[in-house]
């Protein structure tokens, strides 16, 4: 009896200590993010940088102002890019799982990362897997298939990536130790992609993880000294001028910020068409984040303030927050909410891309993190529901207004496309306006 009693007491004590440890971590995390200086800045900057003022003038067919017009304002889309990779579209085990994946994706995101990893795109030289119906490779559906789906669902595609010469992601037939030959092969590779997609894909990660390449050259193909400059110069000559050409970097964005900034300073000084700064955050150590050791808000404020001085759009390109373990899904949602609100408040931020939508759809051991927004049955986890609340509700403007005696109506709303429904006698009149960060946002609607 005494042994049994001691076992019960020991179990209860361990449970208490475990719960207390988690609660202590949550307390640290909550305290960091609810600090008035942090929380107030986020709220203020979302209002300042993610919204604009719309002015609408209502006139009749003769050009006279129409007063006291009742108007319903409903935001339809976001200008800001909320994204995820689309790497397993159509690849799940059953039609039901694929349908749930597609529905969840289209409900939340307007931006999709399409895989162009050279090793899987062209495993056999001269036979790239562009076309729908190409041979199956897990997490590498043919780009044509993904692009078609994006067009059907009004989702903006991004190619990832033109050049990523880490050897494990390169075709076996490419030149590993001959930089000049590799550049010749790379030019042909970029030519083929640009010829096929330059009129459909206007966002590209041109290069990827340059700091890691320099830190660990043995794991990468050898490249000439002007490799990064060549990539942007050559890509810029092949794609449309409006294409956003991005350099994407891993955790060094936060641990080696000076070196990361130097990359863009050099590219801009050379007059190359770099159009965006990509930053990854695969925060596999969730506990370090909860106890304030990894990516605390004030450290991120400092990093993004410095990045802002480069004067380029910033894109969070790959995000993972683990959902593993007891209470893991709830803790994941808590972290996700604070991170997204913070990033959405950054003046130069133009897009945020979660990495793997569903559990067990990640790369190899990354699946252990259970870092999806959906579980392995493609059902929404708390983090997905949290983002749905932010993106589709809190960050969308829907209101009722009326024009004044001079036929003018104004409102402040999140940037994006709006449906304006005018209530007059007879059938309602519908119009569309686009509230943009760079436009005049003055509109004339004739009734």
Image (cartoon, rainbow, N blue to C red):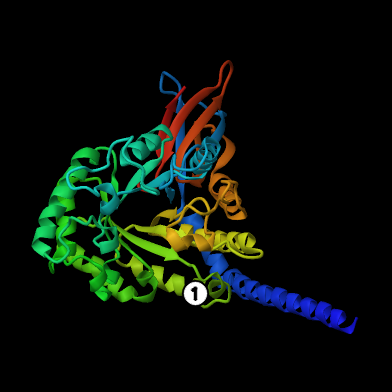
Secondary structure under tag 1 reads: loop
Q: Residue at x 83, y 83 (%)?
A: 6
Mark 1 sits on what residue? 294
With 356 as the anchor, is 194 left or right in this view?
Answer: left
Q: Residue at x 40, y 38 (%)?
A: 442
Q: Tag count in the figure?
A: 1
Q: Residues within 10 Å of mark 1 (few under 14, many from 20)?
A: some
Q: Residue at x 83, y 77 (%)?
A: 8
Q: Pick the quarter of the image with the N terminus.
A: bottom right
User: 369 or 438, which is in the foreground?
Assistant: 369
With 314 as the anchor, is 336 left or right in this view?
Answer: right
Location of residue 424 (image quadrant): top right
Residue that extends furthest to the top in the rendered view of this protein: 426
Location of residue 70 (image quadrant): top right
Q: Is residue 282 in view from this perspective?
A: yes
Q: Residue at x 17, y 63 (%)?
A: 176
User: Residue 419 at x, y = what percent?
Assistant: 49, 32
Location of residue 265 (image quadrant): bottom left
Q: Is residue 439 in view from this perspective?
A: no
User: Residue 322 at x, y = what percent?
Assistant: 54, 63
User: 113 or 273, which is in the foreground?
Assistant: 113
User: 323 or 244, which is in the foreground?
Assistant: 323
User: 42 or 26, which is in the foreground?
Assistant: 26
């Amino acid at each position: 009896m005494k042994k049994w009693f001691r076992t019960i007491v020991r179990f209860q004590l361990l449970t208490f200590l475990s719960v207390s440890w988690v609660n202590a971590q949550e307390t640290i995390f909550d305290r960091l993010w609810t600090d008035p200086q942090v929380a107030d800045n986020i709220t203020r900057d979302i209002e300042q940088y993610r919204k604009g003022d719309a002015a609408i003038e209502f006139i009749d067919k003769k050009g006279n102002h129409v007063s006291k017009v009742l108007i319903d304002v409903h935001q339809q889309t976001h200008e800001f890019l909320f994204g995820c990779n689309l790497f397993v579209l159509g690849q799940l085990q059953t039609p039901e799982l694929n349908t749930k994946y597609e529905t969840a994706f289209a409900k939340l995101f307007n931006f999709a990362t399409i895989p162009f990893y050279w090793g899987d795109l062209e495993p056999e030289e001269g036979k790239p897997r562009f076309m729908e119906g190409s041979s199956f490779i897990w997490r590498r559906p043919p780009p044509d298939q993904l692009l078609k789906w994006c067009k059907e669902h009004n989702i903006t595609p991004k190619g990832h990536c033109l050049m990523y010469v880490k050897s494990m992601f390169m075709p076996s037939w490419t030149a590993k130790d001959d930089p000049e030959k590799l550049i010749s092969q790379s030019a042909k590779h970029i030519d083929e992609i640009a010829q096929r997609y330059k009129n459909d894909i206007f966002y590209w990660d041109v290069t990827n993880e340059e700091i890691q390449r320099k830190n660990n050259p043995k794991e990468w193909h050898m490249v000439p000294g002007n490799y990064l400059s060549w990539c942007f110069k050559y890509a810029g000559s092949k794609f449309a001028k409006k294409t956003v050409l991005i350099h994407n970097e891993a955790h060094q964005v936060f641990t080696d910020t000076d070196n990361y900034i130097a990359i863009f300073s050099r590219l801009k000084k050379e007059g190359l068409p770099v159009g965006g700064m990509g930053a990854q955050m695969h925060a596999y150590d969730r506990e370090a984040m909860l106890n304030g050791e990894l990516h605390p808000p004030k450290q991120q404020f400092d990093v993004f303030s410095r990045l802002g001085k480069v004067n380029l759009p910033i894109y969070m390109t790959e995000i993972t927050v683990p959902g593993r373990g007891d209470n893991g899904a709830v803790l994941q949602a808590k972290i996700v909410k604070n991170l997204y609100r913070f990033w959405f408040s950054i003046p130069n931020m133009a897009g945020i891309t979660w990495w793997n939508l569903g559990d067990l759809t990640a790369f190899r051991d990354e699946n252990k993190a259970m870092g999806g927004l959906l579980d392995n049955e493609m059902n929404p986890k708390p983090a997905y529901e949290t983002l749905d609340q932010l993106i589709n509700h809190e960050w969308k403007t829907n209101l009722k207004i009326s024009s004044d005696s001079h036929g003018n109506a104004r409102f402040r709303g999140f940037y994006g496309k709006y449906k304006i429904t005018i209530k007059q006698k007879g059938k309602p009149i519908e119009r569309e306006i686009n509230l943009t960060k760079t436009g005049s946002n003055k509109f004339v609607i004739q009734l």
